[in-house]
Amino acid sequence: MEDMNRRSAMALGLTVAAAAPLITIGTPAEAAMYGPEDGKEFHPGVRVVMLGKRDSMIPAYKQVQLSDTVFQPGSTWPDEAMANDMVCTVIEGELEITQGEMKFTCKGGDVYSCGKDTHESATNKGTTAAVMRVVDLLPA
């Protein structure tokens, strides 16, 4: 390090500055949060944001529908029977899920499924908003 002069120091500094963007390119972005009025409120503190719907390529289902359900801290989707088969994943925060007698916590990246007529409730016991992404499999 004793042999480093101004020119060497400048070259090293420029090399580090040029490499910095390359290090951050692979870093995944956080999921975008929704505003307090986005979507439609179904229960106090629980809003559903519709993302898309199209015909299904799976013969048992007529259409697939994608939505995000945003749970504010302390909010609950009360126990009710599911209207159709669905696949759910938590993309932000965490939710406590109750399906019949089974209770489990879903954190970011956890995936689970619900069958038609399965009774389920979901509660955000955390201090930040939680987002559940839902793929509804709508019957033919």
Image (spheres, rainbow, N blue to C red):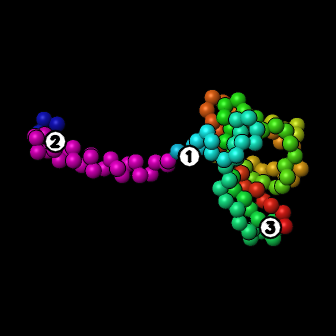
Residue 3 visible? The answer is yes
| Label 2 element class | helix
Identify the residue under disc 2: 9
- Mark 2 or mark 3, whichever is nearer to me: 3
* 43, above or below 25, in the image: above
The amino acid type found where label 1 is placed reads Ala
- Find the magenta span and give its range: 4-29
Q: CA distance from mark 3 to mark 1?
A: 29 Å
**Residue in front for this viewpoint, 115 or 64:** 64
Main SS of the magenta part reads helix
Q: CA distance from mark 2 to mark 3?
A: 65 Å
Report the side of 62 relative to 21 (left or right).
right
Find out whether the residues at labels 2 and 3 contact each other: C-beta distance under 8 Å: no
Q: Position of residue 99 (x, y in %)?
A: 84, 41
**Residue in front for this viewpoint, 102 or 90:** 90
Query: Which image quadrant is residue 96 in?
Result: top right
Lower position in the chain sequence, tag 2 or tag 1 = 2
